[in-house]
Image (tube, rainbow, N blue to C red):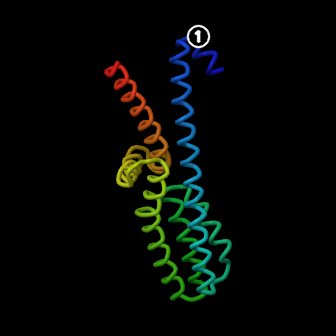
């Protein structure tokens, strides 16, 4: 449907250009999802190791909950942390305090170092730009804005780069 529509509205050269940009956007979004899955997997492994090394029960459950929760910005990791902390507190209050500290450190490292670095490297975005876009998205639309901030930023980046490349080609002709 898209090629037929674009052929009806645009020249063949413009249609190829539009489809190329669309493919670039889809590839960037695919890369973002793969990077996000890698972060979820890393988080799950780290939580599993913590619970296993500390000989705390339900290591695999907490690892799965923590890994999956990384998909939902701020709210997900907060709920996973609360869940893990409350249940380890039932073993001993000191375990609960240590687990809370572990989750605080894990969340800070993930959101301020691992996430911006991994996503930034895979999408060719500066880590500070990623952090700022997430903050801006959160201010505009809360958790949904934070979740959609990076994909929107990547799409905008690719469109702006395409426009600049187009302008450069026009100027150099």
Label 1 SS: helix
Q: Is residue 22 above or below residue 149?
A: above
Q: Which residue is mark 1?
A: 8
Numbered disc total: 1
- Left or right? Give the position of 77 relative to 59: left
Percent position of residue 172, x then y? 33, 22
Q: Is residue 77 above or below residue 133?
A: below
**Residue lying at 56% horizontally and 83% vertically, measured from the top left:** 89
Image quadrant in which the C terminus is located: top left
Percent position of residue 108, x then y? 42, 68
- Left or right? Give the position of 40 relative to 60: left
Q: Nearer the viewer, residue 66 or 158?
A: 158
Q: Is residue 134 above or below residue 162?
A: below
Percent position of residue 11, x then y? 53, 12
Image quadrant in which you'd find residue 88: bottom right
Q: Is residue 42 above or below residue 33?
A: below
Percent position of residue 7, x then y? 59, 13
């Amino acid at each position: 449907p898209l090629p037929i529509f674009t052929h009806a509205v645009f020249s063949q050269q413009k249609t190829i250009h539009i489809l190329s940009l669309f493919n670039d956007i889809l590839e960037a979004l695919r890369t973002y999802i793969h990077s996000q899955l890698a972060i979820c997997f890393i988080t799950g492994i780290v939580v599993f190791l913590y619970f296993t090394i500390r000989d705390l029960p339900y290591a695999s459950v907490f690892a799965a909950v923590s890994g999956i929760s990384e998909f939902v910005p701020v709210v997900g990791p907060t709920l996973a942390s609360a869940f893990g902390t409350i249940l380890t507190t039932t073993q001993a209050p000191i375990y609960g305090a240590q687990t809370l500290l572990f989750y605080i450190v894990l969340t800070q490292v993930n959101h301020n170092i691992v996430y911006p670095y991994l996503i930034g490297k895979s999408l060719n975005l500066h880590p500070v730009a990623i952090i700022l876009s997430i903050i801006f998205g959160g201010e505009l639309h809360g958790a949904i804005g934070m979740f959609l901030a990076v994909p929107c930023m990547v799409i905008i980046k690719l469109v702006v780069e395409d426009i600049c490349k187009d302008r450069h080609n026009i100027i150099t002709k």
